[in-house]
Image (cartoon, rainbow, N blue to C red):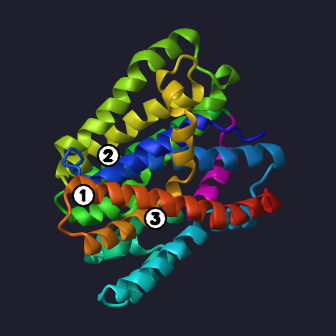
């Protein structure tokens, strides 16, 4: 089975990275950019599980070597570029050389440094989410392989993943007030449920006739539920921060559920109002380079703050976003795409 490309998912990436850019840029509506990261988690869970499941369906197994090589080619070049930028510019601006920060970022362990020691990586602080995803990738092929062998029905596999996500959500809620907010927010074991909810959608789509919802369900989903869900996701950061105990108790579950509603509409809906907007070419383009935007934006934000600290917020934010888009575009076309072309050798 060939992996399907959904342009609207790139559009959704634009929404997710836009939330992060605004939150880190000082836009007061977004008290935290975490909701954008949770959207990325849901997307990653769906796409990776779809790829692995389709490979198993085609070949009867999963090539771990090919999978990890593809992940390396996709993720590492832009991360190395970001670390080089930080290593060169940060000392130039009079700050200490960030050797520990770079080591944590390149080894994908920064989430545990933050979770256990509350270690702040400054210009690379946002790499915690990459670390969680990379740790997820290490174990997920094994889990998908086990699922494919123990269950035949896609619906059964989806239910098993939802059940696992519920167990993790309960485990996290149990530890609220016992563990620190940092431990709750940055641990793989306490955040993996968002990825698993996205992964369950991969099997839900396989369980639907033709991979699409029935007409009646699709109308309600596309014209009402999904738009309201996306609006609600954008409102939650206005109400709470990602360090609130409420997030550990139920907040992450709500965000994961709302993101799943939006994803299911874009993937399997027939009447999606959101897809009409998210499939517009400029929005899809920003989604395609969103990985580079996410990685590069925080160092660029710090650089702009160093250079024009007294400029009005709107001026600083304008420079931050425009430079982030420009540098991420250069990274995508001059560096990342060269490595992405190599992925076809490991299909």
Q: Mark 3 or mark 2, which has the lower sequence index?
A: 2
Residue at 50% across, 80% down? 84
Q: Could you tell me what secondary structure mostly forms the magenta stretch?
A: helix
Residue 132, by quadrant, is bottom left
Q: Is residue 63 visible?
A: no
307 in relation to 217, above or below: below
> Which one is in front in this view, the residue at disc 1 or the one at disc 2?
2
Residue 39, by quadrant, is top left
**Secondary element at image label 3:** helix
- Residues at marks 1 and 3 touching, judged by CB atoms closer than 8 Å: no
Q: Mark 1 or mark 3, which has the lower sequence index?
A: 1
Q: Quadrant of the N terminus?
A: top right
Residue at 28% across, 53% down? 23
Q: Can you identify the residue that label 2 sits on?
A: 252
> Which one is in front in this view, the residue at disc 1 or the one at disc 3?
3
- Residues at marks 3 and 2 touching, judged by CB atoms closer than 8 Å: no
In 3D space, how far apart are the residues under numbered discs 3 and 2 (Cα atoms)?
A: 23 Å
Q: Can you identify the residue that label 3 sits on?
A: 295
Percent x, y of residue 5: 67, 39
């Amino acid at each position: 089975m060939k992996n399907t490309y959904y342009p609207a998912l790139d559009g959704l990436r634009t929404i997710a990275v836009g939330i992060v850019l605004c939150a880190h840029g000082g836009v007061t509506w977004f008290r935290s950019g975490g909701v954008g990261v949770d959207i990325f988690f849901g997307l990653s869970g769906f796409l990776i599980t779809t790829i692995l499941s389709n490979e198993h369906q085609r070949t009867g197994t999963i090539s771990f070597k090919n999978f990890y090589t593809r992940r390396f080619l996709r993720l590492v070049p832009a991360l190395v570029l970001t670390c080089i930028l930080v290593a060169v510019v940060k000392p130039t601006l009079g700050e200490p050389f960030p050797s520990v920060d770079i080591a944590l970022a390149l080894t994908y362990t920064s989430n545990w440094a933050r979770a256990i020691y509350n270690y702040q990586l400054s210009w690379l602080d946002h790499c915690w989410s990459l670390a969680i995803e990379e740790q997820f990738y290490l174990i997920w092929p094994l889990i998908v392989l086990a699922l494919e062998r123990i269950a035949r029905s896609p619906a059964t596999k989806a239910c098993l993943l939802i059940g696992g996500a519920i167990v993790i959500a309960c485990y996290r809620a149990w530890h609220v007030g016992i563990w620190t907010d940092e431990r709750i927010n940055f641990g793989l074991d306490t955040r993996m449920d968002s990825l698993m909810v996205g992964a369950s959608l991969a099997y839900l789509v396989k369980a639907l006739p033709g991979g699409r919802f029935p007409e009646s369900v699709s109308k309600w989903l596309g014209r009402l539920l999904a738009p309201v869900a996306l609006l609600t996701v954008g409102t939650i950061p206005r109400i709470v921060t990602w360090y609130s105990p409420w997030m550990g108790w139920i907040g992450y579950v709500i965000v994961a559920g709302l993101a799943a509603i939006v994803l299911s509409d874009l993937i399997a809906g027939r009447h999606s109002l959101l897809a009409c907007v998210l499939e517009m070419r400029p929005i899809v383009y920003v989604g395609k380079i969103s990985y580079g935007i996410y990685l590069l934006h925080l160092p660029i934000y710090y650089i702009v703050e160093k250079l024009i600290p007294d400029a009005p917020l709107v001026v600083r934010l304008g420079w931050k976003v425009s430079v982030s888009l420009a540098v991420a575009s250069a990274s995508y076309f001059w560096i990342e795409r060269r490595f992405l072309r190599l992925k076809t050798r490991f299909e």
